[in-house]
Image: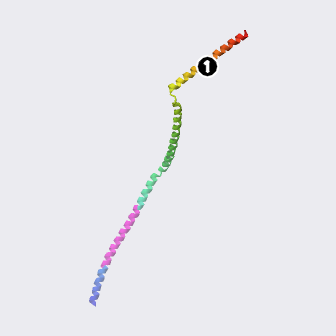
């Protein structure tokens, strides 16, 4: 029996040494987990802070982007107005384009000549009328 107790005692000491060794390893592992957790929190805080700083840097761009959108809409309106104006000008050009400058000049000269002829005929008629009236009076 004493031999059994001694074997049991040896086994217990060996198991106790194993438990102590495992306890040390568990404490080391626990410390590593804490360090990893702390590092993770630190990194997350650091990354969050970096993101916040970048967002703060980009914040002034919001009014610029709003102005850009407004300007883009205005440019779109200008383009539409230019298209409409182009269509109107094309129509006018087609109407005027039917006559080139030389042709218009010739038409003006022709109309001036016809006007002179009409004025000459009117003068002739007036003179004849005056002659008739003078004959009637005499």
Please tell me which residue is depicted at 29% across the width and 85% down the height of the picture. 9
For residue 41, above or below residue 3: above
Please tell me which residue is depicted at 66% across the width and 13% down the height of the picture. 128
Quadrant the N terminus occupies: bottom left
Q: Secondary structure at mark 1?
A: helix
Query: Per the image, is 110 magenta?
Result: no
Query: Per the image, is 28 magenta?
Result: yes
Please tell me which residue is depicted at 45% across the width and 56% down the height of the picture. 52
Q: Can residue 25 be seen by looking at this rendering?
A: yes
For residue 31, above or below residue 61: below
For this orientation, the residue located farthest to the right is 137
Left or right, 60 with reference to 22:
right
Quadrant the C terminus occupies: top right
The picture places residue 88, in percent across and down from the top left corner, at 53, 37
The picture places residue 75, in percent across and down from the top left corner, at 50, 43
Which quadrant of the structure image shows residue 23? bottom left
Which quadrant of the structure image shows residue 134? top right
Left or right, 6 with reference to 79:
left
Which contiguous range is marked in magenta?
17-43
Colour style of the rendered protein structure: rainbow
Please tell me which residue is depicted at 37% across the width and 66% down the height of the picture. 36
> What residue is shown with label 1?
118
Neighbourhood count class around disc 1 (C-alpha, 10 Å): few under 14, some 14–19, many 20 upward: few
For residue 32, above or below residue 111: below
For this orientation, the residue located farthest to the bottom is 1
Instruction: Give whichever of 102, 9 is nearer the camera.
Output: 102
């Amino acid at each position: 029996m004493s031999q059994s107790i001694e074997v049991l005692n040896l086994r217990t000491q060996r198991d106790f040494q194993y438990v102590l060794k495992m306890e040390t390893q568990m404490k080391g592992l626990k410390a590593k987990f804490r360090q990893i957790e702390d590092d993770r929190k630190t990194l997350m805080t650091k990354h969050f802070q970096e993101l916040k700083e970048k967002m703060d840097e980009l914040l002034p761009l919001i009014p610029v982007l709003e102005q850009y959108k407004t300007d883009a809409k205005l440019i779109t309106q200008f383009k539409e107005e230019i298209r409409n104006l182009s269509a109107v000008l094309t129509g006018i050009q087609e109407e005027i384009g039917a006559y080139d400058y030389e042709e218009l000049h010739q038409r003006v000269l022709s109309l001036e000549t016809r006007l002179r002829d009409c004025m000459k005929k009117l003068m002739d008629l007036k003179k004849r009328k005056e002659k008739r009236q003078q004959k009637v009076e005499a």
